[in-house]
Image (spheres, rainbow, N blue to C red):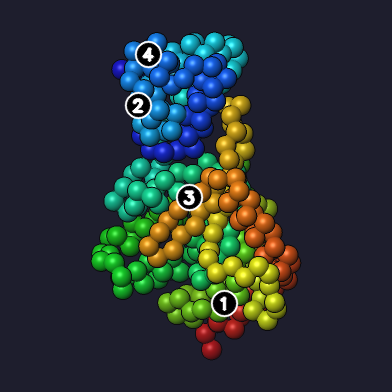
C-alpha cells in the first residue's frame, strides 16, 4: 500500500507544498491547467501547495515530471515527500494538545534555532518538571483540567525539551524579564529548583540565557512574549522564519517577512538591553540562593 504524506502540518509538508508551487510557477502553467492535465480538481492542487491535505508520493512524482524537473532536484523533492510521511512524536498526544499548539510543536521540532522573549514565566523549553506542573495547575482557574490532563501536558513539555540535548540540537537563545525570576510559581522550593535548572541548562553549548534587569531602561518596551523560529534549508528547499505569539486566548504563527523582521529587530534590541550571559547566570544563581529554604 502506498504511503500518503501525513496530514499533520509539519515543516517538511509545508516545505514540500511551497516548493511544488514554486516549480509550477517556474514551469508556467496555471493551477487550473496543471489540474486539467492530471485530471485533478483545481482545489486538490491548491490544497497540496498550501499543505492543507496529505499527498501521495506518486502524485508528487507526477507533478515533478510534468514540470520537467531535473533528475537531481527530483530526487531531493521525492526524498522530502517521503520524509513528510513520518508522523511526529506529538501525534501520540492528541488528547493533551490543541490543534494550534500541535502545529507549533511540529514547527519547533524541525527548527534549527529559536529566539525567545518571555515576560511572565520561564520559557517552556527551560522549565523543570515541578515548575511546569505548577504552571499547568494554575490553568485550573480558567479551564477544567484533570490530574491526568496535567500529567500529559507535563510529559509533552518534557518531550519538547529533548530538542536541547538531541543530536544536532536546537540552538536556543532566551531572554527573560527579571520579574519572571522573582515571581513565585508554586513555592520557594519550586523556584529554587527552577533557578538551579536554568544554571545547569546554561552550560549546554547550544543554550544562551539572558536576563533583562528591572532597574534599567529598555527599548523597545515589548509587553508580549514571543518566539522566533529559524529553519535551515533541507532537501534543497528553504523555509521562512516563523514568529509565534501566544496569549490567554490566541496562539498565532506568522510567516510574513515584514512581521518576522520586526520581531527579530525587537529581540535584538532586547538582547542589547539585557545583561551579558555570564552576568545573567550569576544573577540567576544569586536568586536561587535567596530562594533556598532557611
Q: Is the Cβ of the residue at disc 2 closer than 8 Å to that at disc 1?
A: no
- Label 4 element class: helix
**Closer to the N terminus: mark 1 or mark 4?**
4
Q: Residue at x 70, y 78 (%)?
A: 216
N-terminal-most mark, 4 or 2 = 4
> Circle 3 is placed at which residue position?
253
Is the residue under label 2 in contact with that under label 3 (CB below 8 Å)?
A: no
31 relative to 111, above or below: above
Looking at the rendering, which quadrant does residue 167 occupy? top right
Q: Earlier in the sequence, mark 2 or mark 1?
A: 2
Contact flag, marks 4 and 2 (Cβ < 8 Å):
no
In the rendered image, residue 268, in percent from the top left (x then y), is placed at: 69, 59
Secondary structure, mark 3, is: strand
Question: Is label 3 or label 2 in front?
Answer: 2
Considering the numbered disc 1 on the image, is that residue within a helix, a strand or a loop? helix
State the image quarter where residue 76 is shown. Answer: top right
What is the crowding at mark 3: few (fewer than 14 residues within 10 Å), some, or many (at least 20)?
many
The Cα–Cα distance between marks 4 and 2, rounded to whole angstroms, is: 11 Å
Label placed on residue 36: 4
From the image, tell me which residue sits under label 2: 43
Q: Residue at x 34, y 69 (%)?
A: 139
> Which tag is nearer the camera, tag 1 or tag 4?
4
- Residue 51 image-quadrant placement: top left
Residue tagged 1: 179
Amino acid at each position: 500500500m502506498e504511503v500518503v504524506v501525513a496530514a499533520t502540518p509539519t515543516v517538511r509538508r509545508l516545505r514540500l507544498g511551497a516548493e511544488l508551487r514554486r516549480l509550477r510557477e517556474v514551469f508556467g502553467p496555471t493551477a487550473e491547467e496543471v489540474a486539467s492535465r492530471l485530471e485533478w480538481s483545481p482545489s486538490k492542487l491548491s490544497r497540496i501547495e498550501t499543505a492543507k491535505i496529505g499527498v501521495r508520493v506518486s502524485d508528487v512524482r507526477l507533478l515533478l515530471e510534468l514540470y520537467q524537473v531535473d533528475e537531481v532536484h527530483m530526487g531531493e523533492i521525492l526524498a522530502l515527500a517521503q520524509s513528510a510521511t513520518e508522523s511526529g512524536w506529538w501525534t501520540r498526544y492528541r488528547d493533551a494538545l490543541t490543534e494550534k499548539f500541535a502545529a507549533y510543536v511540529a514547527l519547533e521540532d524541525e527548527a534549527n534555532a529559536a529566539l525567545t522573549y518571555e515576560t511572565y514565566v520561564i520559557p517552556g523549553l527551560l522549565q523543570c518538571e515541578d515548575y511546569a506542573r505548577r504552571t499547568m495547575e494554575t490553568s485550573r482557574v480558567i479551564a477544567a483540567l484533570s490530574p491526568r490532563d496535567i500529567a500529559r501536558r507535563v510529559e509533552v513539555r518534557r518531550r519538547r525539551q529533548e530538542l536541547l540535548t538531541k543530536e544536532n540540537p536546537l540552538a536556543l537563545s532566551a531572554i527573560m524579564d527579571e520579574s519572571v525570576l522573582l515571581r513565585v510559581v508554586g513555592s520557594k522550593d519550586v523556584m529554587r529548583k527552577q533557578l538551579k535548572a536554568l544554571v545547569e541548562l546554561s552550560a549546554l553549548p547550544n543554550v544562551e540565557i539572558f536576563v533583562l534587569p528591572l532597574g534599567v531602561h529598555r527599548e523597545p518596551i515589548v509587553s508580549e512574549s514571543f518566539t522566533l523560529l529559524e529553519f535551515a534549508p533541507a532537501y534543497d528547499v528553504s523555509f521562512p522564519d516563523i514568529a509565534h505569539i501566544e496569549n490567554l486566548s490566541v496562539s498565532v504563527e506568522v510567516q510574513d517577512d515584514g512581521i518576522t523582521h520586526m520581531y527579530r529587530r525587537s529581540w535584538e534590541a532586547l538582547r542589547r538591553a539585557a545583561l551579558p550571559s555570564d552576568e545573567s547566570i550569576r544573577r540567576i544563581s544569586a536568586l536561587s540562593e535567596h530562594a533556598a529554604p532557611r
